[in-house]
Amino acid sequence: MEAMNETTSLQNRPTKKRCLPSIDAWLRPIAVRMLARYDDPRDVQKFLVEKQKRPVPIESVRWYSQSPAYAEIFNKERQKFLNDLSVIPAAQKSVRLTRAEELYREAKEKDNNKECRELLYYMKSEMDEVKGGINLTMNQYNILSDKEIGEKIRRIKSRIVQMTKEDKADVSNGTVS
């Protein structure tokens, strides 16, 4: 009852900073971590409402991303997130290009020339960002799984050994006898 009077009474109404933390104490660090990982504040708000079983103002959620009291947690989580972008598939250029290639094939099947041009331009711009003159060659290995590539390597090595025996090649010095 005392908490109810504090929030409803105008003379005892807390300052803006004190009234914003309407998020349960145990959920605050979780909310800060979610915001540090660039989660949408509305998604964080939905999560908090679900956990607390009461409304949470969006301003309260946003406040925690800038709160000095939670700056250390926020900064550590943001740095951890940015350092670990490799686990996000879309952060990988090869994944983005593969997905764009799939979309290109679909657009081509539908004779959507405008979308095909846009996708080709996008893929070119992705490749233009590559420094050092890397030449990406699309070949049969791009569609194989790790297991299939391993099997292909095993067969190639086996074939080399077989050819070596058949041709009596001297592999040690690189000559064929």
Image (tube, rainbow, N blue to C red):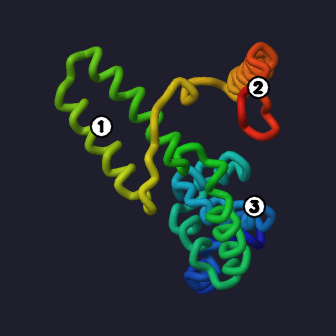
Q: Which residue is painted at 66% across and 64% down in the image?
A: 83
| 50 or 19: nearer the viewer | 50
Labels 2 and 3: the sequence-earlier one:
3
Contact between labelled residues 3 and 2, with CB atoms less than 8 Å apart: no
Quarter-of-image position of residue 5: bottom right
Residue 145 vs residue 83, the one in the foreground: 145
Say whether residue 151 is visible.
no
Q: Quadrant where the C terminus lies?
A: top right
Q: Secondary structure at mark 2?
A: strand
Rendered-image quadrant of the N terminus: bottom right
Q: Give the residue number, with chain letter if any, for mark 3.
A: 27
Badge 1 or badge 2: first in the primary sequence:
1
Left or right: residue 171 versus residue 152 is right
Q: Amino acid at mark 2?
A: Ala
Cα–Cα span, label 1 and label 2: 49 Å
Residue of label 2: 169
The residue carrying pointer 2 sits among few (fewer than 14), some (14 to 19) or many (20 or more) residues within 10 Å by Cα, namely some
Q: In terms of secondary structure, where does tag 1 sit?
A: helix
Q: Amino acid at mark 3?
A: Leu
Task: Using the rendered view, name the quadrant where residue 100 is placed.
Answer: top left
Residue drawn at the location 79% of the way across and 30% of the way down = 170
Circle 1: is it few (<14), some (14-19), or many (20+) Cα within 10 Å?
many
Q: Helix or strand or loop: what does disc 3 sit on?
A: loop
Q: Which mark is residue 119?
A: 1
Indicate the position of residue 52 as horizontal and vertical percent values: 72, 52
What x and y, as percent, mark residue 149? 69, 26
In the rendered view, would you say 145 is above or below 84? Answer: above
| Residue that appears at 40% across and 31% down | 101
Q: Amino acid at mark 1?
A: Leu
Task: From the viewer's perspective, tell me whether residue 139 is left or right of residue 47.
Answer: left
